[in-house]
Image: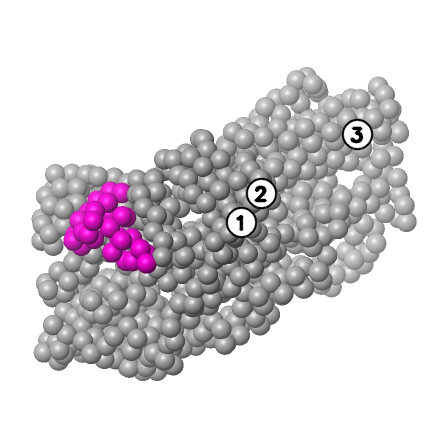
Amino acid sequence: MPEGEDNLQGAHVELRDISKSFGGTRALEGVSLTIGRGSIHALVGENGAGKSTLGKIIAGAHAPDSGQLLLDGEPVRFHSPRDAIARGVILIAQELAIVPSLTVEQNVFLGVEPRQAGFQNRRELRRKYSELAASVGFELDGAANAGSLRTADQQKVEILRALSRNAQLIVMDEPTAALSRPDVEALHKVVRQLAKNGTTVVLVSHFLGEVLELADTVTILRDGRLVHTVPAAGQTEDSLMAAMLGRPVDATFPAKRLTAADAPVVLAVRDLVAPGVNGVSFELRAGEILGLAGLVGAGRTEVARAIYRANRVHSGSVVIGTGNAVSGTPRAAMRAGVAMIPESRKEQGLLLTRPVKENVSLSSLAAVSTAGVLRPGTERRTVREILARVDVRGGGYALPAAALSGGNQQKLLFGRSLLRDPRVLIADEPTRGVDVGAKRAIYELLTSLTASGLGVLLISSDVEEILGLAHRVLVMRGGRVTAELTGDGVTEAAVLGAAFGTEVPPTATEEERA
Amino acid sequence: MSQPQAATPAPEKPGDAGNNGASVPAIFRVPRAGLLGKAREGGIIYPFILLFVILAIWKGSTFYGKTNLLEILDQQSATLIIAAAGTMVLIAGGIDLSVGATYALCEVIATKMAIHGDPALAIIVGVLIGVGVGAINGVIVTFFRINSLIATLASSFVITGAAALITSGNLIIAYTALGFANFARTEFLDVTTAAWTMIGVVIILGVVLARTIAGRYMYAAGSNAEAARLAGVRVQWIKLVTFAISGGAAALGGIIDASRVLSASSSNGGTVLTFTVLAGIVVGGTSILGGEGAIWRTVIGVLFIALIGNGFTLLAWNPLYEQITLGVILLLAVGGDAWSRLRTT
């Protein structure tokens, strides 16, 4: 598949010397590349390398400052995504644009509904929908409420919508970032199907494995410049990563620190029952990283939220250290010595519009104030110190948190948590949407924290991350812990087997509601 | 308002290229604020200065003379107090549409009490009732989870009704209660006590918002309530407090005005006051979406609107156009804000 299909079928899109700045910062500089018709073309790079920007320029969501965009050999200027759609180029953004209260069919044909005398023609809508869905082989109930679908199915809705507009080129920005493993496989099948039918797919992705699996051609960007465009066939994850970083990668995970067998228990959870959690018990020792694995929806986040009292707890107990029972609210949990880095840093973690400084000090204001009045100097010093510890340096504390990269945003949350000097740190997907370099930094941070006697509960959908970091792994399924893996028992097969409830990892297409 | 990047974050920020974690210092490169960004930073202050200079040149000392300026300050005392408190409500993510009604209720209660008894007691009771009304609003919004726009709209009808019941719809005249007049009309260093009270309240609220834990929590609650909750902020409590402050401020405003004119009526204040206050806050640049803003901005915003009114009076222009002007300015303020956010992301 990958051997130079571009040349056989001709260029669909050609970019010539594209540059784009936001304010004073160059996002892209002199990027030229050719995307072959019917190919799957991946754009990879670290956060901020410019891959999303490039994807958006192709789809008309951004206009380039200079350079030329050629569609089928003909220069075009898209002034808006609408322009691009008219020419068959559609962007499926990271944040899906689904109207939750409408049905799947209505979403797919939103704005181009079949009408009769000004009214929606439901029968015609249904017919057109089944036709379209059948043409790509999607089994998706058109009458279902789009808001009730899982993310993977919502993505299908977006793809169908794109196809209903006769899309010849679809730009997908991180389509699998929020998907569980079987859904990822399902989406991959869809993408291959699209390419087979002659649709060109531009894939913006963080996941190098996915890129290698799907793409015909890979374009690597670094700091807004093109490193090179190569056939995916000859590449490995390491070669891609080396090109992205501009240096070879060292071992991805820091060496595990051994936990003393007699280390004190810092977190004891007994028979915890809460929304999505059906009786979970475990202990976490000082200096230990305990991995919590499982499919999306298996109840991992729910366990974290119940421990932190972000969710209501029906029964069971949570004890921190030598006897601080947690009860009540997140505020109480925090005071008992738990800190949580929530799953979604933008929705649950950060005050995006507020300065970096305020984001970091938010949970520890009492320590930087006298009788309720803040001491600005103390606050600044405290924030600077903790940010240095989590490896965010360089000032700019007055900038809004939104201005930081994903990795630095995540480190802000680590900083906020560590200022509390907790006994237990719950990190829920701490590296989601974070670039490779920052991932490594977060791994090192987690490992170094355990040295100071912190117990870490690590939740991650990335099995490798769990394997690479955790001393012990609990696998969850249906709100219960179904397996505890230690030592040599911690293998990918064991984790996946327990997660799916089978001995061996299931075939990719199995779609099961966990 | 002061941050050019404040709007919805794009999934990939252009400014954070190439952070390799360990070796590279964190990079906080963001687009430099251009001229537009600078203008936003200062916001309302430039139009305010411009308007001031124009009026000063046009009408000379009639405008910038001590008498006129102090008169404006005196007249705006109530509005400024209420708007300063309203800024807190907005920043914490709420909105209080009942201030006009609370203003009327508390002024009639205090005035009635002042006629028959101790004016000091009347003032204290009036303000406390305002705080209580605000706290009830807060409870409805936080514990019963009713949208603050609707909750305070509904409560404003109830409050207005209560005020009308107390007065039976009549104007309450307090010309005999001279002690009550002293509250707002005493002059100290040529400035009325109404204005002094306003200055004191505005400074206190300004310090609370900008320099205390409570203030910081208000911003956090309005910027991202869920994140604030998980960070240990008692979001509901802090929102409730802002409504209570708003109610107390509305009461104080009403009592100051009643003391200035020695009369009170249940039809005073009302929606006109509510919307003037909101206009001042928004023109000043506090975000209606919460999490952004400042009390000094509100002060400039309210005074800007007051200067327009003063200008119309001094130039003897048809006051009907004043409302049209105000409406256009409000749109420009909100639109300019939204537009510049779009441009910088």
User: Could you say where residue A482 lies in the image, as x and y percent from the top left?
Assistant: 31, 43
Q: Amino acid at mark 2?
A: Thr
Query: Dot 2 corresponds to which residue?
Result: A322
Binning the other alpha carbons within 10 Å of mark 3 as few (below 14), some (14 to 19) or many (20 upward) gives: some
Residue at 85% x, 32% y: name it: B181
Question: For the image shown, how many numbered marks are present on the structure?
Answer: 3
Marks 3 and 1 share the same chain: no
Which chain letter goes with mark 1?
Answer: A
Residue drawn 56% across the image and 70% down it: A393
Q: Residue drawn at (54%, 68%), measured in percent from left and top?
A: A392
Which type of secondary structure does the marked residue at label 2 adopt?
loop
> SS class of the residue under badge 1?
loop
* Label 1 crowd bin: few (<14), some (14–19), many (20+), radius 10 Å: some
Q: Residue beneath label 1, please?
A: A264
Can see residue A14? no
In reply to whether residue A506 is colored magenta, the answer given is yes
The CA span between labels 1 and 2 is 9 Å
Instruction: Residue B342: give x, y in percent of width and height.
Output: 45, 61
Type of colouring = one colour
Q: Is residue A42 left or right of residue B123?
A: left
Q: Chain of mark 3?
A: B
Highlighted range, magenta: A488-514
Q: Is residue B88 visible?
A: yes
Distance between the alpha carbons at the discs numbered 3 and 2: 50 Å
